[in-house]
Image: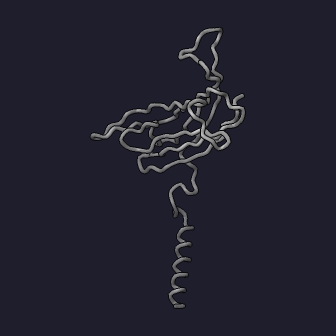
């Protein structure tokens, strides 16, 4: 029994040693994600008394969440088509999701790609997600972003939580 225990302990130590070698472990474990995110606020109002098209209505402000991939990376759009994980942005105030009566999220359509009978929609390069607030938040809002980051070599899921400061 002692020999079995010693053999198992040696195997565990060896496995731990190999996991510490450079290049070991899951991809991107110690590397930065291939996507960065940036947010900006815009005040929605008519200029010089002219009407905006479409009309602003009850909307008070718009935030733009910019998806900024590294060179060679893309993601699937919110409606990815036949394959892929959809881009999803959820806004939360004090831990509760903001519903359509407060916030409208507008996603970019993406470019269509066909492979056999399969159709997909990808976002390449810098892409905006528009967050149109019908009721202006008086404090910061949490954004949960999930997407599938893909390159020619691999794809992996990205899930980020960002703080969108209160509008100016």
The colour style of the image is one colour
Comparing 107 with 58, the one in front is 58
Q: Residue at x 64, y 41 (%)?
A: 142
Quarter of image, res 76: top left
Q: Position of residue 92 (x, y in %)?
A: 62, 40
Residue that lies at the very extreme toward the top in this rendered image: 49
Q: Residue furthest left?
A: 116
- Residue 85 on image: x %, y %: 44, 44
Which residue is pictured at 50% across the width and 87% down the height?
Answer: 4
38 left or right, relative to 116: right
Query: Residue 79 at x, y = what percent?
Result: 43, 36
User: 53 or 112: nearer the eye?
Assistant: 53
User: What x and y, as percent, mark residue 144?
Assistant: 58, 43
The residue nearer to you, when weighing 5 against 143, is 143
Residue at the image position 51 percent from the left and 40 percent from the top: 88
Q: Nearer the viewer, residue 44 or 154?
A: 44
Give the tally of numbered discs. Answer: 0
Which quadrant of the figure contains the C terminus?
top right
Q: Is residue 126 above or below residue 151?
A: above
Give me the residue at 56% from left, 72% from top.
Answer: 16
Does residue 69 appear left or right of residue 142 in this picture?
left
């Amino acid at each position: 029994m002692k020999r079995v225990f010693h053999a198992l302990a040696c195997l565990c130590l060896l496995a731990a040693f190999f996991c510490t070698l450079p290049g070991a472990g899951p991809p991107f474990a110690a590397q930065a994600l291939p996507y960065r995110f940036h947010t900006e606020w815009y005040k929605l109002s008519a200029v010089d008394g002219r009407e905006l098209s479409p009309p602003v209505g009850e909307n008070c402000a718009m935030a733009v969440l910019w998806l900024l991939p590294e060179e060679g990376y893309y993601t699937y759009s919110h409606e990815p088509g036949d394959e892929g994980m959809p881009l999803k942005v959820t806004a939360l105030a004090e831990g509760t999701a903001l519903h359509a009566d407060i916030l409208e999220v507008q996603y970019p359509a993406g470019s269509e790609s066909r492979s056999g009978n399969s159709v997909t929609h990808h976002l390449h390069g810098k892409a905006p997600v528009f967050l149109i607030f019908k009721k202006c938040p008086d404090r910061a809002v949490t954004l949960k972003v999930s997407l599938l980051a893909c390159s020619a070599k691999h794809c992996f899921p990205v899930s980020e939580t960002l703080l969108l400061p209160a509008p100016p």
